[in-house]
Image (cartoon, helix red, strand yellow):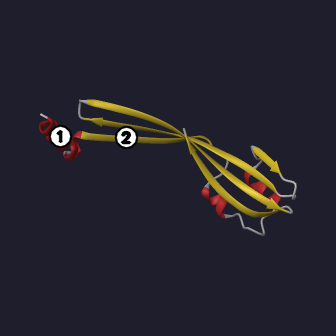
Amino acid sequence: MIKNVLLLLMALTLTGCLITIDSDSRPLHTVWDEGNVARLQIGQSNQDFVSTSFGDPSTKLSYADGTEIWKYRNRSEKDTEVGVFLVFSVDVEEERMETLSIEFAEGVVSNYWIEEDRY
């Protein structure tokens, strides 16, 4: 019995025309993109440049040594639907949050990184 079920599942999987996948991604809130980030230059870009390019950060952190970290967040949603021909369909929604963190030392970019969270 188990062997027959496994063979049926394998047959359904191998017949690509029976499986459909539809994926759609849409931005919910976008502050920055890869092109903006590529323009950041460590040791050269200053706070005025960053403020002009990205606007006001969602969060500003200040440390005792004088460094600051500005955070900018992008939110997007991805909807994926997987179906097996007239048997079943699964719809998966996923929200992504990407955070661009820019570290300043004496008003100049000293580091930056991107973190991604999925919900």
The mark that comes first in sequence, 1 or 2, is: 1
Q: Quadrant of the C terminus?
A: top right
Near mark 2 (Cα within 10 A), the count class, few <14, some 14-19 or many ≥20, is few
Q: Which mark is residue 80?
A: none
Q: Position of residue 116 (x, y in %)?
A: 58, 49
Q: Amino acid at mark 2?
A: Asp
Q: Are the residues at dot 1 and dot 2 in contact (C-beta closer than 8 Å)?
A: no
User: CA separation, marks 1 and 2?
Assistant: 25 Å
Query: Which secondary structure lies at badge 1?
Result: helix
Badge 2 is on which residue? Answer: 22
Near mark 1 (Cα within 10 A), the count class, few <14, some 14-19 or many ≥20, is few
Q: Position of residue 88 (x, y in %)?
A: 28, 30
Report the side of 67 relative to 31 (left or right): right
48 over 58 or under it: above or below: below
Residue at 77 percent of width and 69 percent of height:
43
107 over 3 or under it: above or below: below
Residue at 23 percent of width and 30 percent of height:
86
**Callout in the foreground (1, 2):** 1
Q: Amino acid at mark 1?
A: Leu
108 over 26 or under it: above or below: below
Q: Quadrant of the N terminus?
A: top left
Residue at 73 percent of width and 67 percent of height:
42
Residue at 66 percent of width and 59 percent of height:
37
Badge 1 is on which residue? Answer: 6
Report the side of 36 relative to 21 (left or right): right
